[in-house]
Image (cartoon, coloured by chain):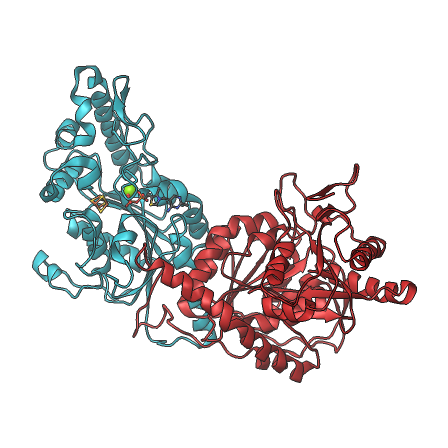
Amino acid sequence: MADKMELKSVEVWDGNMASAQALRQSQVDVVAAYPITPSTPIVENYAGFLANGYIDGEYVMVESEHAAMSGCIGASAAGGRVATATSSQGFALMVETLYQASGMRLPIVLHVVNRALAAPLNVNGDHSDMYLGRDSGWIQLDTFTPQEAYDMGLCAFKIGEDHDIRLPVMVHQDGFISSHTAQNINPLSDDDAYAFVGEFQPMNAMLDFEKPATYGTQTEEDWHFEHKARQHNDLMTKVFPKIEEVFAEFEAKTGRKYKLVEDYYMEDAEVVIVAMGTTVETAKLTARIIREQEGIKAGVIGLRVVRPFPFEKLADLLKDVKAIGAMDRSSPNGTVGMLYNEIAGVMAGTAEMNAVMTNYIYGLGGRDMTVEMLKGIFRELNENAKAGKRLGAIQRFINVRGPELSFLGK
Amino acid sequence: MAEQKKIKNLKSFSTTADRFEGANLLCPGCAHSIIVREVLNATNDDLVLSAATGCLEVSTAVYPYTSWDASWIHIGFENAATAVAGAEAMHKALKRKGRLLQPDRNPKFVAFGGDGASYDIGFQWISGAFERGHDMMYVTLDNEVYANTGGQSSGATPIGASTTTTPAGRVSYGQKRQKKDMLAIMAAHGSPYVAQVAPNKWKDMTKKIQKGFAAEGPVYINAMSACTTEWKFPMQDTIAVSDLATDSLMFPLYEIVNGTEYNITYRPKNIIPVRDYLAVQGRYKHLFKPENAHIIEKLQADVDAKWEYLQRREEARV
Ligand SMILES: Cc1ncc(C[n+]2csc(CCOP(=O)(O)OP(=O)(O)O)c2C)c(N)n1
Ligand code: SF4
Ligand SMILES: [Mg+2]
């Protein structure tokens, strides 16, 4: 039996420690991992727990991230709780296996500490890796603070491992800004956390020798489509109710309330920033300030769930707003950003929605997004709202050297 | 210690219950299936198996069917070793935590990969798994070519073989690079047991597989797998061609115990010339043109040198 850790009601943890503690408390059976900045401390912290008797699962230090996820797949199919962590290049190296994990319906949890993708090489936070994973068939939970990284780290197992779901789950946090910034965190006790996550319930386990299972079959044009369709169907219809159920249970236990889409100042908001990661926190603060100082009816939407995409929730929240700024922290490389694209899809499918929308590309490679810049964006959205039309280009780059960089329209 | 199956003769072998079904899509005469049966039949213990993408995988688990009456997983081309390594780690974890569904069982973890999956694309994954010391067996089905994708060359393709990516032509005699010595490489990982086997020498093979199952830690087996389609010989000749391979010493049968102890396990009564082995295969046809005679000479010289080397290693015990 692993030792229990005595935790204070408030601990000072950075996002990486928060993730590592959530893994420890969930009593993961197998962690197969490989280090990469900025998620390295997750596996280092975990190794420290192991070295001091707090872990009785297996910890497999593999030779690459591809092997990390491959080992996770083998372990998960064998029938037990499995998790790992990575970032950036490591995430990119895993991509092949991400699809294999979700296609085999293996409920692996992956902590992704978001970081830019080379070239040029960069160790800082942006959302390139998170975007790279968005069609991989995983559930993607986004967090804005270390506390949330911890909380989602517990919820993720409960969501993915449910026998109706059986899908892998990523828990995202921003590299450095969240992963390396220590904050006050309210953890659960080891017993309460494990009671919440629950014991792993095997399904089609390879280690059940009374009922051998075949994993990873060949399907061609005869069956492949049905498998993919079923996976998509489950993502579209089963995952949101399950997440909401888990969030409700979590709230009952902790008092902390989570939603599929987090919204701030939205009751009467006219101009809204839609963002992910730590920028949601900065935008929240900015909205409060700009409401007080300039009377702009600013609101903020932060995506808690990136995949499946909360289409209907967004339609509901955005149907009365006048201007939307879709904030993408990943280079769209030849089109509009992912969030702009998705919200445009929401708008196209929602008759009542007729906001003016612009797309801001920001923060690549860890470039700061400040309150002042967000104020500027709210003001711009406010001008659009007043004019009832978009006054500038659809897409604009924020805080990049050189002359104003904008595309699609003037 | 593994529960070893007593197999006295071919008849008892052919009547043992199959955990790998004859109902599969491998070519008639494919040696992969013979090898797999010989490996699985060597133990009565439960099995957790993996296969790399390749002929074996695409031919044995075509949804909604499976040829495997044992737990089996295919992830990708390069990571079959890591797939069973992960499962083996889970077994250890659940054992420690007292959560095994059938705690009295003693499962064996076996990965199968082609030569492409092993010598080339999956090399790093195998190396990592062996360095970590998982209790598992990795079996390379060595047909010296990427058969599944139509016969491209691999790191196991011998000098002179014509493949679709090293075709023999007016100015080429085919593959020019040396076949990688996987056995020495795997022995150098500190593996307790490394062996080369051939399905025609089934007693030798069964003995080695059982030794491998009895050993603790990662065991590597290189299994010669004559490929009727890519080696280009008639499908009923698989075993005859395999006999020529082992009797010409193109595939010497030996084992390496604990990294240094070499044992030759088959000494042909009559060593036949390499050219007799080459002559029955379409992939070497062009070598019999006069301008390529030096390649056959080179192959013979290489085989002689390797045989000499193996005997000296066996004698030296170091
Ligand atoms: C990452 C990746 N690259 C390439 C392929 C294409 N591919 C599938 S099987 C194969 C060759 C298999 O050769 P080998 O491992 O020798 O097995 P064999 O079919 O000969 O038994 C190739 C190139 C793949 N499936 N995945
Ligand atoms: S191509 Fe060769 S290896 Fe593949 S199934 Fe046919 S005989 Fe076997
Ligand atoms: Mg091959």
| Residue situated furthest top in the rendering | B291
Relative vertical location of residue A35 with respect to residue A267 in this rendering, above or below: above
Relative vertical location of residue B11 with respect to residue B204 in this rendering, above or below: below
- Quadrant of res A270: bottom right
Q: Is residue A193 left or right of residue A14?
A: left
Which of the image's four quarters has the C terminus of chain A?
A: top right
| Residue situated furthest left in the rendering | B11
Give the x, y percent position of residue A71: 46, 58
Whether residue A27 is visible to the viewer of this picture, yes or no, is no
Judging depth in this view, the residue of A117 and A298 nearest the camera is A298
Give the x, y percent position of residue B263: 25, 43
Residue at x-position 75% and y-position 78%: A9
Give the x, y percent position of residue A141: 61, 65
Give the x, y percent position of residue A58: 50, 65
- Quadrant of res A1: bottom right
Q: Chain A is shown in which shade? A: red
Residue at x-position 86% and y-position 66%: A291
| Residue situated furthest bottom in the rendering | A252
Q: Is residue A277 left or right of residue B195?
A: right
Q: Chain B is shown in which shade? A: cyan
Residue at x-position 22% and y-position 60%: B20
Quadrant holding ligand 1? top left
Relative vertical location of residue B273 with respect to residue A163 in this rendering, above or below: above
Whether residue A306 is visible to the viewer of this picture, yes or no, is yes
